[in-house]
Image (tube, grey):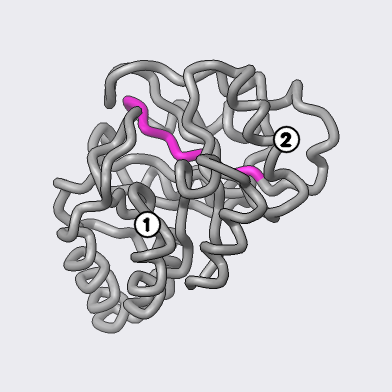
């Protein structure tokens, strides 16, 4: 299982500190984007990522928790994102979003909030991201209902012959990461589990537990 640190910050200065803390320890970093329409509060301006120096080795991806994620694709491309994931709840057309990202030569994903039923996953989707708790700012435990949703995705993969990557974000820690991996989750997106404490030690614990 791959562990990908997530950057969810209102302040660019705080986001930069986190990026610099993990940039030499991981291959990929996810930047969360909240516009205040889908979820409470707003994150820093995405374009500011380009101000961070010495991150040429980092593969960026964006998690767009915004109204009409398709309108944020160009901004994601501007920071050299290689994967773009959009929340489905405020997305008018999932097929159109996936196709636009794919036509740009990038990996495309859909994200489902904890209460959102899983449906309508286009064949070209590379990643399906399940939120383990309500999206947005704040630290909350992962809800058990996410396990059922993982099972649904695995069954959907088998039934329709799809090979998208399954990711989970929200409340993952060293106590539940192994269970998720055993169920078929390929990516653990982690915020607090990486950044609360010594980052290098946290990443080792998560990787050893998975």
Task: Tell me where residue 177 sits by quadrant.
Answer: bottom left
Question: On screen, 21 above or below 200?
Answer: above
Query: Which of the marked residues, 1 or 2, is nearer the chain's N terminus?
Result: 2
Question: On screen, 93 above or below 121?
Answer: above
Q: Report the span colored magenta.
A: 60-67
Q: Determine whether the residue tagged by mark 2 lies in a helix, strand or loop.
A: helix
Q: Residue at x 40, y 73 (%)?
A: 178
Residue at the disc numbered 2: 20
Q: Residue at x 55, y 63 (%)?
A: 205
Across and down, in percent, residue 55 comes to 79, 39
Across and down, in percent, residue 105 comes to 63, 51
Residue at the disc numbered 1: 168
Across and down, in percent, residue 97 comes to 41, 42
Q: Nearer the viewer, residue 53 or 21?
A: 21
Residue 72: numbered disc? none
Residue 21 on the magenta segment: no
Q: Determine whether the residue tagged by mark 1 lies in a helix, strand or loop.
A: strand
**Residue 23, can we see it?**
yes
Gap in angstroms between the C-alphas marked 1 and 2: 23 Å
Q: Residues within 10 Å of mark 2 (few under 14, many from 20)?
A: some
Task: Tell me where residue 152 sits by quadrant.
Answer: bottom left
Q: Residue at x 38, y 50 (%)?
A: 169
Q: How many marks?
A: 2
Q: Is the stretch drawn in magenta largely helix, strand or loop? A: strand
């Amino acid at each position: 299982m791959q562990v990908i640190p997530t950057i969810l910050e209102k302040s660019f200065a705080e986001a930069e500190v986190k990026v610099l803390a993990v940039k030499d320890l991981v291959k990929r970093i996810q930047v969360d984007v909240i516009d205040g329409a889908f979820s409470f509060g707003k994150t820093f301006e995405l374009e500011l990522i380009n101000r961070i120096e010495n991150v040429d080795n980092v593969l960026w991806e964006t998690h767009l928790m915004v109204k009409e994620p398709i309108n944020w694709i160009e901004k994601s491309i501007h920071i050299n994102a290689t994967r773009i994931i959009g929340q489905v709840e405020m997305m008018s057309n999932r097929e159109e979003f996936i196709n636009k990202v794919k036509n740009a030569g990038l990996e495309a994903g859909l994200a489902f909030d904890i209460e959102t039923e899983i449906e309508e996953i286009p064949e070209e989707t590379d990643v399906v991201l399940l939120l383990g708790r309500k999206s947005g700012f704040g630290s909350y435990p992962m809800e058990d209902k996410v396990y059922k949703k993982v099972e649904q995705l695995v069954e959907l993969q088998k039934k329709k012959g799809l090979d998208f990557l399954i990711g989970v974000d929200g409340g993952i820690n060293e106590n539940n990461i192994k269970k998720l991996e055993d169920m078929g989750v390929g990516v653990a997106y982690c915020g607090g589990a990486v950044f609360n404490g010594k980052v290098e030690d946290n990443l080792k614990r998560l990787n050893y537990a998975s």
